[in-house]
Amino acid sequence: MVYMFVGPSLVLLNKHIMQDCYLNYPLILVTLGLASSAIVARLFAWRKPSLVRPAAVQVLAGRGWFRIALPIGACSALSVAPDNVAYLYLGLGFMQMLKALNAARVAAYVALGDLRGHSTGAAAVVFAGTAS
């Protein structure tokens, strides 16, 4: 339930920071967001270790963090930064409409590339998610 309020709130906050506060550096904004998420996740894991699976702790121990988590975080930041650049030039409603079409684009690419079997039910779910 909290996720339903935090996500849209962060979208509005990012747009406010990018346009009203004139922060024209989207990669910095994305990096700060990912760093704060990592810190909060680490605090939860430190405060209540039972939240973390033992297999995940073993994989990310030592140099595993640099081999696995760091590249994923860096690629995530680099993939979100162009979205934030678009906030500088486009309206919030139009941006959210474009993001909503991502599921349809992915489904079309999978179908065109025949990357895996797809069913009519999966196509209906993608259509319903895009239409809503």
Image: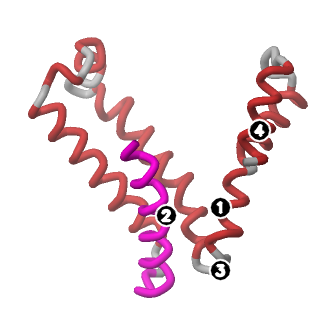
Disc 3, disc 2: CB below 8 Å? Answer: no
Q: Nearer the viewer, mark 4 or mark 1?
A: 4
* Residue bearing mark 3: 89
Q: Nearer the viewer, mark 2 or mark 4?
A: 4
Q: Which mark is residue 96?
A: 1
Residue beneath disc 4: 128
Q: Can you identify the residue that label 2 sits on? A: 11
Q: In the image, what residue type sits under mark 2?
A: Val
Cα gap from disc 3 to disc 2, whole angstroms: 15 Å
Relative to residue 124, is residue 11 drawn left or right?
A: left
Chain part drawn in magenta: 1-23
Quarter of the rendering occupied by the N terminus: top left
Q: Amino acid at mark 4?
A: Ala
Q: Nearer the viewer, residue 53 or 68?
A: 53
Q: Residue at x 58, y 71 (%)?
A: 85
- For marks 4 and 1, the one nearer the N-term is 1
